[in-house]
Structures are given as structure tokens and as C-alpha cells.
């Protein structure tokens, strides 16, 4: 494994449905971040894990969003009752010290 | 508060021209790290460079060079002899310590290199 892997790459869902994204970080990286990027903007921080502990959450992460990182390996980001405003690219990054690498992202479209 | 400003929203140049992308940052911390990432149309963020706040030496990597000036809180990126493949959105980002704080990204500069 040479990079951060995200699945799926694209997701189209109907408003109100739940969606779940997965991120597999670089294996020796203990920190994992989720970011959201809307069209024409830079990525915005959502949440961060140090191993399995979720240490920080942005105010952007409403109650409909939940993230987990069981066993400190892969992470999932779930959005419940999706809204059209959730349409964005969801990026995952893993880091060791400040060396950070991003996955290719999951592009979510809520219709 | 931490903030990154990229005042240039879009830049268009003709191939082989040099182009400089500006980045100005704000932080009260004395230890911080600055980054540049490239985002091609495929969407992934490609790491280009990391610079810590104690190292003001400019860096050159092939056609890319970076000018870090703490006095003006700037970390500018120059592409020499631009190529069409350089067309992408470029993000400057800041992380203000080594203990897991998140990145703060600028809004990005869209560079179009025309043949």
C-alpha cells in the first residue's frame, strides 16, 4: 500500500438517505483526518483521529455526521439523512508528524 | 486565529512563461508548517512541499521554487517555464504545531497554462 485509499470514489444518493465512506490510511501513519471540499473552495477540516481516538471535531460536523476509526486502522465517515448541502468532495488524509498524504476523495452528490 | 490567503483566484499563462502563486498566512504560533498542494482535475491533492517556520531557506525542485519570507508572512510558489500539465488548482496550507492540529487551507489558485 503506497497511498491513502478512499472508497467509493463517487456516490450519488437521494436526499434523506444515509451514506458511508471508507478511508484506508498509509499503514504506518497514526493520524487520520477528514476534510470536506465544496466547489471552488479549499478543503475544510471535519475531524481528526490519533490512532482510534477521535480528538477533534469541527463545528461543520453536525449531529448527522459520525466518524469512527476502530482499531486505529481504517476510518469510516457516515452521513445520516443526507441533505443537498452535503454534496461535496470528502477527503481523507493520513499523517506521520507533519508529512500528510491525501486520498483521491469521495465525491458525494445528493439529489 | 490561523488563516491562509491566496489572493489570486485564477491565473492564465501561456506555456513556457514563469508564474508565481502568492500565499500569505496568519498565525500567532512560533512553530508552524507551511505546505503547497496541487489538485489536478482528477481531484486528489498532491503534496509539493513542506516548510517549517524555522527554515527560511528558499527551495528549488526542478521547475518549482518556493520563497518563504517570515517578515511578510508569505510563502510564494513559482513555476518556471510552465507546461500545460501544470494546469491545476494550487493550495497553500498551514499547520501550526506538530501535535495533530488540522490543516488550514487557502481558497486555492486555479492555474491554466495555455499551449
Image (spheres, grey):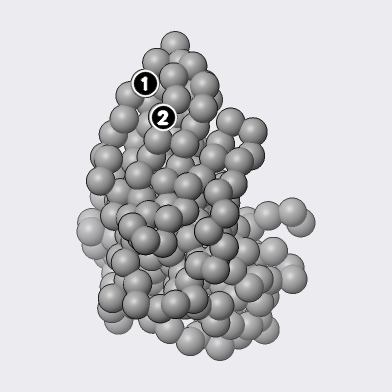
Q: Residues within 10 Å of mark 2 (few under 14, many from 20)?
A: some
Spot occupied by residue B7 in the image (x, y as percentages of width and height): 25, 46
Is residue B52 or residue B55 the one in the foreground?
A: B55
Tag 2 subunit: B
- Residue drawn at (62%, 64%), measured in percent from left and top? A99
Is residue A22 or residue B103 the one in the foreground?
A: B103
Q: Quadrant of the N terminus of chain B?
A: bottom left
Q: CA distance from mark 1 to mark 2?
A: 7 Å
Spot occupied by residue A46 in the image (x, y as percentages of width and height): 39, 71
Residue B110, above or below A6: above
Left or right relative to B82: residue A25: right
Please give the residue where the numbered disc 1 appears in the rendered image. Answer: B13
Quadrant in the rendering for residue B99: bottom right
Left or right relative to B112: residue B86: right
Label 1: which secondary element: strand
Mark sitting earlier along the chain (1/2): 1
Residue A12, above or below A48: above
Please give the residue where the numbered disc 2 appears in the rendered image. Answer: B19
Spot occupied by residue B109 in the image (x, y as percentages of width and height): 34, 41
Q: Residues within 10 Å of mark 1 (few under 14, many from 20)?
A: some
Q: Which mark is residue A75?
A: none
- Residue drawn at (74%, 54%), measured in percent from left and top? A2
Left or right relative to B28: residue A49: right
Amino acid at each position: 500500500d503506497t497511498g491513502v485509499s478512499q472508497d467509493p470514489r463517487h456516490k450519488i444518493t437521494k436526499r434523506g438517505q444515509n451514506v458511508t465512506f471508507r478511508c484506508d490510511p498509509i499503514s504506518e501513519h497514526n493520524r487520520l483526518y477528514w476534510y470536506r471540499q465544496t466547489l471552488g473552495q479549499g478543503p475544510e477540516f471535519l475531524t481528526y483521529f490519533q490512532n482510534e481516538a477521535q480528538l477533534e471535531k469541527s463545528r461543520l460536523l453536525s449531529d448527522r455526521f459520525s466518524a469512527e476509526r476502530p482499531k486505529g486502522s481504517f476510518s469510516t465517515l457516515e452521513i445520516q439523512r443526507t441533505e443537498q448541502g452535503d454534496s461535496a468532495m470528502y477527503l481523507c488524509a493520513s499523517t506521520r508528524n507533519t508529512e500528510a498524504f491525501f486520498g483521491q476523495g469521495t465525491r458525494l452528490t445528493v439529489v | 486565529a490561523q488563516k491562509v490567503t491566496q489572493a489570486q483566484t485564477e491565473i492564465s499563462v501561456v506555456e513556457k512563461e514563469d508564474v508565481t502563486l502568492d500565499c500569505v498566512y496568519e498565525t500567532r504560533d512560533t512553530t508552524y508548517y507551511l505546505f503547497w498542494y496541487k489538485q489536478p482535475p482528477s481531484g486528489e491533492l498532491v503534496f509539493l512541499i513542506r516548510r517549517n517556520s524555522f527554515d527560511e531557506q528558499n527551495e528549488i525542485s526542478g521547475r518549482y521554487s518556493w520563497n518563504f519570507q517570515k517578515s511578510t508572512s508569505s510563502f510564494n510558489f513559482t513555476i518556471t517555464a510552465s507546461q500545460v500539465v501544470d494546469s491545476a488548482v494550487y493550495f497553500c496550507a498551514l499547520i501550526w504545531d506538530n501535535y495533530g492540529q488540522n490543516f488550514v487551507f487557502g481558497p486555492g489558485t486555479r492555474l491554466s497554462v495555455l499551449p
